DNA sequence: ACACTTTATGACACCGGTTTCCTACAAGAC
DNA sequence: GTCTTGTAGGAAACCGGTGTCATAAAGTGT
């Protein structure tokens, strides 16, 4: 059978071995591998059998050299949220599994002035098949242009539909925040604070927009004192919530633009002796592990992150041999409000 | 200057271009690239200047083919702890940064019967420079043997020093748990429960061992009823803690073998109306984000995970051009007990 | 002055695929 | 029976590096 496939030290078969064994030329073997249509069925079968018998697998390095293109998908990110990055990886990898593509991870510095140059040299060197850009750097149009210029496929993850839907996998942040804040209003809250994400982040802007729209729709004016900027970090949530809870009259509910800041807000409330949700309702965003495990369990918004990763990978593989059917309209994913125990009617 | 380096469409220079421009042979350029010692200083400089001027970068695919070895480090894992996986990635990547190595991520199924075969085909295909094995699969000797057989460098991450220290980056789980439990005993606890990790995991065994040794050293007998197995998941922590708190006399402290189970235990205590730490002290393990953000902030053990990642990468790069000085004795890393607010003397 | 290293470099094959171009042959048109 | 036309498959060059070995020039000892 696989006589020499497992003998340690025995070299792996190459395309030449297969050609010799099946009595055809390299090129014909290559045609078999690449499912060329102009091939005699009988020849194909003969070569195919040899390939199976020997356990031959084409050498990816040689292919990459000849094709000037690697079977690698890059994940370029600058995102501190471990769960998000890993969720993405998981989604992408689940689609890549069984194909000849592999995932290569490239964290970058958003702050760096050489960001675009760094990514450029990475893409040029590795000749990736495609890249997935995670927020916040996915919001950088310069990177998208770079990919276009380099002929590298790309998908941008984001919190809102952008113009180039072809390259976008997005979630409906604004709408779901609208829903969340409307829900707070629905249970009776009128003074609602928001801890926003940092200025310049699309996600921060979208979420804030959803917040303001919900208030506007309910005929509630936005009190600027109830809008405090955070940095998406725990400490900033703690600080921002303290500031909000100093206002008078005190807000009865807070929407935090991510879970980490929401848990900071929870701590701030506790320091003031406030009970959540009796004295203060809190809603977060992301549904990280912490949301479910904190006390009280946090009402929050769940991003279908793994699904989005799958969609991104499918987009990148579209048109290749390994392509999976692309689900139509899967550019926009709907986040979901997860009801737990951090919301109650105001006293 | 870099006349054609940035003209879109202009092909990237190859080794042939450099050879032609500097009037030497390909081989000599290759020698310059690889810092060959038997090279005239003057020639080197001339070629080096051309390389700099043109912005030439060797094609990694061609190198991989010729060398039969890729400049890729693999991260093979089957670990549900996002923070741990990402921390590792971060550590590894910080060492890889600036080198020509890239990181390629490969999650696997521990359960799968084809585990070793999967990893084998992955390694054979990609011809990685080396791999980092994360627990729990790093505990599988079969994989280590496989790497040896394939001539692939590897580093195993683990929770205890194993025999092959050359391939090991470990933490002192047992000792630090001993320290943690001794600390509980020190503040007065006598009935201490443990939620262990699942049987078969080295980390679970080590932590349990540390627990038992600490009790033994204090002359306290281990009550089998106070040892409950968990699965490292939140729900199992909740369940296990409920079981422990049903015992009478009730334990006054619980050591949970990871933070997720510790937070489950916290919930169990809250359901029974128990105050942590007044009625029940809890110590966790991992220092995940949740530990600091939960209420009360969890006393726990911090793995120097990023540092361990760096060490692993340094080990894999040792002896290469990109090698960084290997810190001697960095096979064993010391975890640290982080004191927060979930421990108090028993009533 | 001679053989004998040592040093610096080049020619050429090779890694394992793909692409281009060409040939041989069979089928169909006239 | 000759002339296209189409199809299956092969030869050789190529992708961009590296290894092996040969060679010319310079240095060394006697």
Image (spheres, coloured by chain):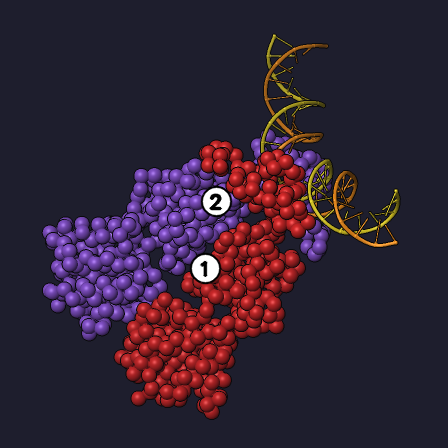
Chain colours: A purple, B red, C yellow, D orange
Q: Is residue B130 above or below residue B30?
A: below
Determine the residue located farthest toward the bottom in the rendered image: B219
Q: Secondary structure at mark 1?
A: helix
In this view of the protein, can residue A133 be seen by the observer?
A: yes
Q: Nearer the viewer, residue B87 or B266?
A: B87
**Cα distance between the residues tagged 1 and 2:** 20 Å
Q: Secondary structure at mark 2?
A: helix
Q: Is residue A123 above or below residue A39?
A: below
**Which residue matches tag 2?**
A121
Q: Residue at x 41, y 48 (%)?
A: A115
1 or 2: mark nearer the eye: 2
Please count the marks in the image: 2
Residue C27 location, x and y as percent? 64, 20
Residue A140 location, x and y as percent? 35, 45
Q: Are marks 1 and 2 in contact (CB under 8 Å)?
A: no
* Left or right relative to A198: residue A274: left
Q: Residue at x 36, y 49 (%)?
A: A137
Tag of residue A304: none
* Left or right relative to A252: residue A267: right
Residue B171 location, x and y as percent? 50, 72
**Which residue matches tag 1?**
B90
Category of crowding for the residue at label 1, using alpha-carbon neighbours closer than 10 angstroms: few (below 14), some (14–19), many (at least 20): some
Q: Residue at x 25, y 49 (%)?
A: A206
Residue A41 location, x and y as percent? 62, 34
Q: Residue at x 61, y 72 (%)?
A: B163
Category of crowding for the residue at label 2, using alpha-carbon neighbours closer than 10 angstroms: few (below 14), some (14–19), many (at least 20): few
């Amino acid at each position: 059978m696989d006589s020499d496939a497992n003998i340690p030290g025995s070299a792996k078969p190459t395309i030449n071995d297969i050609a010799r064994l099946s009595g055809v030329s390299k090129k014909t073997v290559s045609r078999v591998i690449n499912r060329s249509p102009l091939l005699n069925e009988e020849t194909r079968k003969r070569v195919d059998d040899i390939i199976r018998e020997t356990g031959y697998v084409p050498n990816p390095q040689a292919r990459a050299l000849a094709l000037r293109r690697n079977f690698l998908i890059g994940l370029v990110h600058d995102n501190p949220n471990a769960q998000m990055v890993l969720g993405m990886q998981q989604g992408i990898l689940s689609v890549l599994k069984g194909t000849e593509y592999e995932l290569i991870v490239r964290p970058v510095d958003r702050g760096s002035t050489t960001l675009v140059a760094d990514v450029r040299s990475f893409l040029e060197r590795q000749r990736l098949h495609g890249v997935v850009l995670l927020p916040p750097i996915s919001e950088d149009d310069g990177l998208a242009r770079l990919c276009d210029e380099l002929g590298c496929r790309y998908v941008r993850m984001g919190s809102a539909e952008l113009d180039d839907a072809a390259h976008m996998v997005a979630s409906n942040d604004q709408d779901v925040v609208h829903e969340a804040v409307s829900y707070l209003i629905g249970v009776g809250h009128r003074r609602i604070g928001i801890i926003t994400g940092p200025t310049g982040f699309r996600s921060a802007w979208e979420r804030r927009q959803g917040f303001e729209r919900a208030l506007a729709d309910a005929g509630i004016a936005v009190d600027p004192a109830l809008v405090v900027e955070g940095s998406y970090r725990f400490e900033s949530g703690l600080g921002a919530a303290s500031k909000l809870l100093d206002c008078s009259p005190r807000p009865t509910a807070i929407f935090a633009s991510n879970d980490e800041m929401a848990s900071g807000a929870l701590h701030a409330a506790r320091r003031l002796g406030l009970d959540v949700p009796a004295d203060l309702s809190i809603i977060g965003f992301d549904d990280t592990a912490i949301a479910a495990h904190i006390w009280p369990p946090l009402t929050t918004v769940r991003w279908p992150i793994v699904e989005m990763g799958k969609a991104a990978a499918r987009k990148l593989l579209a048109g290749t041999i390994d392509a999976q059917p692309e689900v139509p309209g899967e550019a926009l994913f709907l986040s979901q409000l997860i009801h737990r125990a951090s919301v109650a009617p105001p006293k």
